[in-house]
Image (spheres, coloured by chain):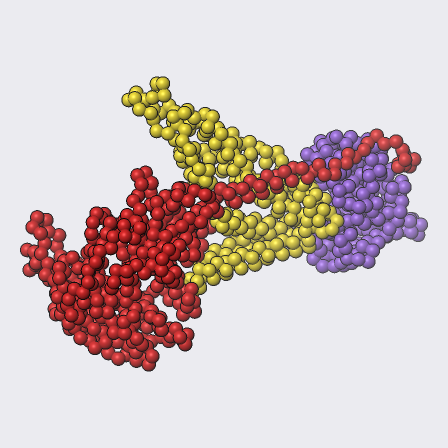
Chain colours: A purple, B red, C yellow
Amino acid sequence: MIHVENAHKRYRLRKVLDGVSFTAQKGQITCLIGMNGAGKSTLLKAIMGLTPLSKGSIRVDGVQSSRELYEKVSFIPDHTAMPGGYRLEEGLRFMADYYHSWNEARAAELMTFFNLNEGDRVGNLSKGMAAKFGLVLGLAADTEFVLMDEPFSGIDLFSRELIGEVFSSRLIEDRGVLITTHEIDEIEHLLDRAVLLKDGKVARDIDCEQVRDEEGKSVLDVMREVYRT
Amino acid sequence: MDKLEADQPQSFRIKRKGTVRYVLVGALAAITIVTLGIYYGFASNERLPSFHLKTIEGDEVVGRTVQLDGRYVGRWGNRDMRVGVEGTDYSFEKRLGMWISLPTFGNYSPKSQALIKEHRGFMRGKTGGTIDQSKDWLTIVDIYRQKDEARLKLSVLNKSTNKSAAYTIDAGPWKDRENIYPGDVQIGGDNIYILLEHMTVNRAGVARYLKFTAFAFDLKTGKLNASRDIPLPDLTGLSVSTLGDRGDQTEAPNVVFITSKDLSESAGNSADSGPKATASSEPRRFEYKAYLYRYADGNLLPINIPDPAKFGRVGTYLDGNMAYTIHLAGESDSWSSEAYRIEGLDLSKQKLKMTYSLKASDLGGELMGSPRFKNGLLYFIVTGEQKPGSMGRPYTKVAAIEAATGKVAYLGQVEYDGPSEKAADELDQSVLINLNLRS
Amino acid sequence: MSHYFKLLALEVRRFRFVLAGMMLYTMIIEVLALAQQINSYKHRFGLTNGVTDEGSVPPSLSFANLIINTQRGFALAIVIPMAVLLAYVLLIWYRDWLGRHPFIYRQLMVPGGRTPLYFAKLTAFLLFVFGMLAWQLLLVAALQLEYAWLSPEWMKAPSVFTDAMYASRVFQLILPLDFTEFLINYGFGILLVLLAFAGILFERSYRIRGLLIGILYLVLNVVLFIYSTHAFDGFLYPDEQLAVCLTIFGLEVAAALWISLKLINRKVSA
């Protein structure tokens, strides 16, 4: 599991994270919800070691800053993090070069499924295709966790549906997924947990099914409660 | 999802490219290393010629005191070099970028370098002053002004015990417009003798001799034995040259003063204005007087020198009671001569003791450079004739002659050590015409 | 270790067009400049049948002498690639951070730590610099052939390769004939690159504050090093001063490396 404990982060003069703690379990889809600038991306990047925390700790399977973190956790950022001049196949080769956990066969499968052409250049991809390529890069590896930063933002409807299909597939089944978004429509029914961030703190940390059963509320309802006041 | 099964036929394969990716990096690295390696290994300054001074006759110890300065002109650029018994040193100034030069011993004289090598601790921080050393002592004398007083700072190293000491000697008053210099420093036995020249500078900037003072200091006890004004006659209107003892074997060193007076028409005005440049065609006449001063007892002896106008034309060297004068003989130009004539004058007896000729041809050469004198030996560079179109000389030798007898004590020749095989060509391109002594 | 080589190959490959462009540019400028010089010399004397109007043969001009006359051409050929490389000290890092495709995410997330990444970028940059130097040397050799080919018989005269290198003021600076001087100057240059990298990593870790710290760090290091070249003048002998200087150099290199690795592994923000 990924355990974030008392995370603090200051960005310029603003306290983006002010004591955030939560846990993302393997086999569950956890969603970080918050308004723009709430610190969701920052949290994901902090887990991936892409930005340091001012205070607090992050443990993956009990271990802090492990060298093998990247073989266990894969990251799908909101921008395609491959040079614009790269062809898709070069991007895939990059992953194959450095990660033991990279599964070539699955990558090939996903490329076919998403109908992506290996000769295309990263810079020429539409938003939808870029998002799909990101998914290939993130999901083809045999990692335990997948972190996704705003996977649906700006994507066309059909691509979104396709991506949604991936979520309910075998591909995600036994992994832990930590996803950030402020558009939860497509995946609300898939979420296991939701962590709502407000003013740098965890406003609510809910088990979605439990809340639906016990309080009769959907995640959206909870969101309204938290953010409208 | 059924579609996502790995055993489905793939329409896509990642191309494997194992070692091909390293081709570019490898090629770049290889070409870079090889090219730069060849340049700095074979083409650059690493291939400058090296020479050394080989002993042909005599004791190599004498050869070790010699350093030949010159240039190698076979390639463009500053190729100042120094050749000695141990080899060749190209003294490049190492620069960082265009403005910063790195520290180097290059600015130090060969004598200083030798002293620093021998007595590293003692020489540290000693940046000026007059140095004299004997077998037992090494001394550095410096003069400075404190308010209106002249002071001598004396740093002493006892070579046998390796103990050093520093003394301050009161050197009398120092008035404004006065310049005081150490004119001669001599070690005799366990004493050091310091001669100070006192000069005044008038408003026009003309300098005149005022007087000379001498100090005798006991190095063993650290006490000043004597402080004397030298009883020379009135020095108004006179030029004075001093000859210090150049032999290190004397227990009781001397110094010779030669005063000259310009007797041509402007003699009457010389008191205030100093020597004038006369446009007259009449030959200038000088009146010479010479004195021998003994440091040990302070005795001043007037002496007669035959032909004083020529005294020291090329050089005159004092060694104890003997004064050796070097005259040009044969064909000569501004720096070399076919032969020299040496006269040895016994100053205490005021008699010419010996005279002999030194010919370049006797020493295996064609030209001899200006002499250097040290410890009773006269050092000469002996070379062959410069070939037309060539800057160097076909061969360069060094000869050390006993001044008292004219016998050859040492003969050495510059030899080419490599790296190429063209010894004659490389020697032709080396111009070694300055002889320096390291002690 | 294999990650280091892979990343190094990647950095070199990404720069290959710029590198080739610089090499091509240098070659074209120098070839043209030399040809133009030979041409103007050829026509200076107003010859008929290889002999001047006065009936004498005009003086020859050796390759090395020709280079003396071509100072501006070589300066122009060198200054643009120098500027490009200077810019790339910064761009080699910033190109991956800025823009729509932050490749730096991937580079920082390579398993096994970021030390290979740092050294890959460092050695890649140094390879480009020394590669251009090697290219310049090869070019001079090629220009000798051009000289032999283009100059008329009466103009030809022999010259030594090192004299040709000495003839150009820019070559004296970038390819000094003395190996020790080469080591000193490029050693200092490498130190500057290390300090620049540290500055960049400071900026990427602490933004504006980091930029100021980085600049201050660079200035202090340079000043200390330059001061140490003549430390305690008059008290220390030149060989001791050199030893001090070298020690300071070693310490500064080690410090810059240590700080950079600490920053990139723990403090940098993507």
Q: Is residue B296 at all visible to an observer of this figure?
A: yes
Question: Image height check: is B116 above or below C166?
Answer: below
Name which residue lies at 77% across and 36% down: B16
Question: Is B128 on the left-hand or right-hand side of C119?
Answer: left
Front-most of B179 and B241? B241
Q: Position of residue B413 (x, y in %)?
A: 36, 52
Question: Image height check: is B43 above or below B378?
Answer: above
User: Number of labelled discs?
Assistant: 0
Front-most of A197 and A142? A142
Q: Quadrant of residue B165?
A: bottom left
Name which residue lies at 75% across and 34% down: A88
Name which residue lies at 20% across and 53% down: B328
Front-most of B5 and C184? C184
Residue occupying the far top of the picture: C49
Question: Is C231 on the left-hand or right-hand side of A152?
Answer: left
Q: Position of residue C4 (x, y in %)?
A: 69, 47
Question: Image height check: is B121 above or below C22?
Answer: below
Question: Is B410 on the left-hand or right-hand side of B332?
Answer: right
Question: Image height check: is B76 above or below B128?
Answer: above
Name which residue lies at 13% across and 59% down: B307
Q: Quadrant of residue C99?
A: top right
Q: Position of residue C256 (x, y in %)?
A: 59, 55
Q: Position of residue C179 (x, y in %)?
A: 50, 48
Front-most of A8 and C224? C224
Residue occupying the far right of the picture: A213
Q: Is residue A80 at all visible to an observer of this figure?
A: no
Question: Is C51 on the left-hand or right-hand side of B32?
Answer: left
